[in-house]
Image (cartoon, rainbow, N blue to C red):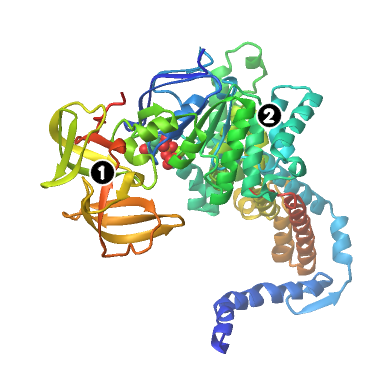
């Protein structure tokens, strides 16, 4: 049994705007799936189609093996938390949480028990008699969460629930959401544009761009083996460096050059023989400062240094003014204008086609 | 702050303050003694104490005017505002074809002005040739053939002779005011509705609330402050109803005072009969009525919630 399934789902808005294009996704019971992608990529639209707040232009959505295309939101057994929380402003916290239970005709005693349970889980006891206007952002967020939990739905749908909180609270709530999920084990679909939030929360990520799924996988998978140039650039911080050039792979020996300069030489696993235009991708974390004599060292000039505690980001420029960002252990003496040498970790370089899609060239295994 | 900049706000306010002083505040203070006087022309008067007020309470025409005014006010609030809100709800939906045109159409009586609407209404409510009676008669003809209902219908000449302006003045006034002000109040409601986050309604939808419960549990409470304000405006405006009746109705009040309102009665006493003292007393009684309305609104608004 799957908890949620999307089959060839499309959303086409008036005026031929295709916001979601042919999405296929199968979510298992108890999974925490995060839809992540840049603004406007169709995450919310996808979520809202699952919720039933948006009609499905083409394709089929099932929840718990039942096709729900024509099922009203209230009958889909889902609960949703909105970015702006959407708490009923004139109802107390207690009434907000109890609203759906009251409508469903649950006996008063059971409702009270449920509200007590939820407020225990989320620490809402002191807030029960207050109205949303008298709560802080974090407290409102908690109440919205409580309202969703109280319904005990089959699926939780979250649309950027943390993005209205300040950075510190956001990170605290992340941890809390994670432990909440571990406790309740309810299937969750979570939307965010923040790749870091996605990586920390999701048991599986769905990376979207321009209405299409780019890659589905565990956070580690997606980080280590991005399917294409978009995913590679979107996931990870600072963003991966991309350098266009010529790739030659022969007899297990990989050679990448740009404008006549050797950028990378080494043996890269699972890279088929080729001789073509390509793009090399290197995460700033996979770049080392090395001695001039080290094989594969590239000469570079330091442009900018940003210390980050025990590490630092340095922006360097190689011979043809291509800019590369590296994250290296903090060390003194590295200053603007300094001539240094860098090298790429052969285990962690990525190669992509030099095309619009930029598909990954080095296979996984 | 220099002396000049301190004076600036008052300078900007000066035109209003001067006009307010001359045409509102001074007459207001003068009207206090005036309500206790009996005047003989503009210059001569004698002090009569509270007699003008006690006269009002014993004056059947005053009570008729008060009753008519309250009927008009109740009709305005109970018919016009729900209609305005319903129009706003319909126009607030995403997929309404020609939303802008409808909005303009409903608002258009405001654009042409009260006098024009009143004159038009007078023509429409006329006996025999008036549009209202003609339509009613036409409608009656259509269903005259039906069993049972057909038998109950009055004759065509009876329908054409319905004396709206003469004896059914209040319904005619209420309908005209509906036409005149529903679109205006709709704009307030529409603005309020557009400020209700759509996620609220969606959350309620997911929580299982049907359209009616969503309206009463989510939409209405969210627009309550605006709704109370619109009710107050409507009540105050209705209590002061005058021009509409004065233009539309024969003698400005219909036959047998059927359309006599408080302000019309004030006007008749003050400017046709010339009893300024009595007119002023009625004015103060109207002011008392308005104050009650305003205080009620303040009390209701105290329970207001912020979104
Ligand atoms: N009602 C609508 N009519 C037409 N186009 C729409 C409508 N709603 C959304 N879109 C378009 O669909 C695309 C996807 O929108 P969506 O809200 O799903 O993006 P998102 O990934 O959630 O972005 P964000 O991170 O900014 O919330 C956007 O290009 C948007 O402009
Ligand atoms: Mg969104």
Q: Mark 1 lies on which chain?
A: A
Residue B276 higher or lower than A176, as above or below: below
Q: Residue B294 carries which label?
A: none
Is residue B85 visible from the viewing direction of this image?
A: yes
- Front position in the image: A16 or B15: A16
Marks 1/2: CA–CA distance: 47 Å
From the image, state whether disc 1 or disc 2 is nearer to you.
Answer: 1
Q: Residue at x 59, y 80 (%)?
A: B10
Residue A7 higher or lower than A243, as above or below: above
- Please state the horizontal and vertical placement of residue B139, each as a whole percent of the image: 55, 24
Is residue B207 visible from the viewing direction of this image?
A: no
Q: Do labels 1 and 2 share a chain?
A: yes
> From the image, which quarter does the C terminus of chain A lie in?
top left
Question: Position of B83 compared to A300: left or right?
Answer: right
Q: Whereabouts is ligand 1, in terms of quadrant?
A: top left
Q: Residue at x 26, y 63 (%)?
A: A338
Determine crowd level at label 2: few under 14, some 14-19, many 20+ residues with C-alpha closer than 10 A.
many
Q: Residue A242 carries which label?
A: 1
Question: For the view shown, which residue lies furthest in the left direction?
Answer: A260
Mark 2 residue CB less than 8 A from any atom of ligand 2: no
Q: Quadrant of residue B220?
A: top right
Question: Position of B303 compared to A180: left or right?
Answer: right
Mark 1 residue CB less than 8 A from any atom of ligand 1: no
Question: Position of A35 compared to A246: left or right?
Answer: right
For marks 1 and 2 on the same chain, the one whose residue lies earlier in the sequence: 2
Q: Which residue is drawn at 45% across and 34% down?
A: A44
- Front position in the image: B298 or B24: B298
- Front position in the image: A137 or A333: A333
- Please state the horizontal and vertical placement of residue B80, each as a whole percent of the image: 63, 41
| Residue named by callout 2 | A150
Give the secondary structure at mark 2.
Answer: helix
């Amino acid at each position: 049994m799957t908890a949620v399934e999307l089959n060839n789902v499309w959303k086409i808005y008036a005026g031929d705007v295709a916001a979601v294009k042919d999405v296929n996704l199968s979510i298992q019971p108890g999974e925490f799936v995060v839809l992540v992608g840049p603004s406007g990529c169709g995450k919310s639209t996808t979520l809202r189609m699952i919720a039933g707040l948006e009609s499905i232009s083409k394709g089929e959505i099932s929840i718990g093996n039942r096709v729900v295309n024509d099922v009203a939101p209230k009958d889909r057994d889902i609960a949703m938390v909105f970015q702006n929380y959407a708490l009923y402003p004139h109802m107390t916290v207690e009434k907000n949480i109890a609203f759906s239970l009251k409508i469903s005709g649950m006996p008063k005693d059971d409702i009270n028990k449920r509200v007590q349970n939820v407020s225990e889980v989320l620490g809402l006891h002191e807030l029960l008699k207050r109205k949303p206007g008298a709560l802080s952002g974090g407290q409102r967020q908690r109440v919205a969460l409580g309202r969703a939990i109280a319904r005990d739905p089959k699926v939780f749908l979250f649309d950027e629930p943390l993005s209205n909180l300040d950075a510190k609270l956001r990170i605290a709530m992340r941890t809390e959401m994670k432990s909440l999920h571990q406790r309740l084990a309810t299937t969750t679909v979570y939307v965010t544009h923040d790749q870091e939030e996605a990586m920390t929360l999701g048991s599986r990520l769905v990376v979207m761009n321009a209405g299409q799924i780019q890659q589905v996988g565990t956070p580690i998978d997606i980080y280590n083996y991005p399917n294409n140039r978009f995913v590679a650039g979107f996931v990870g911080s600072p963003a991966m460096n991309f350098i266009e050039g010529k790739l030659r792979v022969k007899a297990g020996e990989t050679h990448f050059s740009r404008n006549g300069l050797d950028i990378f030489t080494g043996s890269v696993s699972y890279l088929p023989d080729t001789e073509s235009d390509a793009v090399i991708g290197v995460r700033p974390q996979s770049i080392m400062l090395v001695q001039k004599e080290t094989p594969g060292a590239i000469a570079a000039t330091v442009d900018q240094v940003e210390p980050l505690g025990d590490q630092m980001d340095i922006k360097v420029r190689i011979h043809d003014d291509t800019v590369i960002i590296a994250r290296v252990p903090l060390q003194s003496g590295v200053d603007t204008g300094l001539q240094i040498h860098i090298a790429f970790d052969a285990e962690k370089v990525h190669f992509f086609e030099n095309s619009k899609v930029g598909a990954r060239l080095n296979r996984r295994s | 702050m220099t002396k000049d900049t301190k004076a600036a706000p008052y300078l900007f306010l000066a035109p209003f303050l001067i006009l307010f002083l001359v045409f509102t505040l001074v007459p207001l203070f003068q009207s206090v003694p005036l309500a206790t006087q009996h005047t003989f022309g503009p210059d001569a008067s004698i002090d009569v104490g509270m007699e003008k007020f006690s006269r009002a309470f014993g004056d059947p025409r005053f009570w008729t005017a008060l009753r008519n005014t309250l009927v008009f006010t109740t009709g305005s609030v109970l018919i016009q505002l729900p209609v305005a809100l319903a129009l706003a709800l319909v126009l607030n939906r995403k997929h309404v074809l020609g939303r802008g045109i409808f909005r303009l159409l409903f608002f258009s009586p405001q654009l042409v002005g009260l006098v024009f609407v009143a004159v038009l209404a007078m023509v429409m409510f006329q006996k025999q040739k008036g549009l209202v009676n003609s339509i009613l008669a036409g409608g009656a003809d259509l269903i005259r053939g039906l069993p049972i209902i057909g038998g109950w219908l009055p004759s065509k000449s009876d329908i054409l002779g319905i004396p709206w302006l003469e004896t059914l003045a209040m319904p005619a006034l209420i309908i005209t005011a509906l036409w005149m002000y529903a679109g205006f109040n709709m704009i307030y409601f529409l603005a309020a509705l557009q400020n209700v986050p759509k996620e609220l309604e969606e959350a309620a939808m997911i929580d299982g609330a049907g359209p009616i419960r969503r309206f009463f549990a989510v939409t209405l409470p969210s627009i309550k402050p605006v709704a109370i304000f619109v009710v107050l405006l409507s009540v105050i405006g209705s209590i002061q109803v005058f021009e509409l009746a004065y233009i539309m109705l024969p003698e400005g009040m219909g036959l047998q005072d059927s359309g006599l309102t408080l302000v019309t009665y004030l006007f008749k006493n003050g400017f046709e009969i010339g009893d300024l003292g009595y007119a002023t007393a009625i004015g103060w009684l109207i002011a008392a009525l308005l104050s009650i309305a305003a205080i009620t609104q303040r009390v209701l608004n105290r329970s207001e919630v912020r979104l």
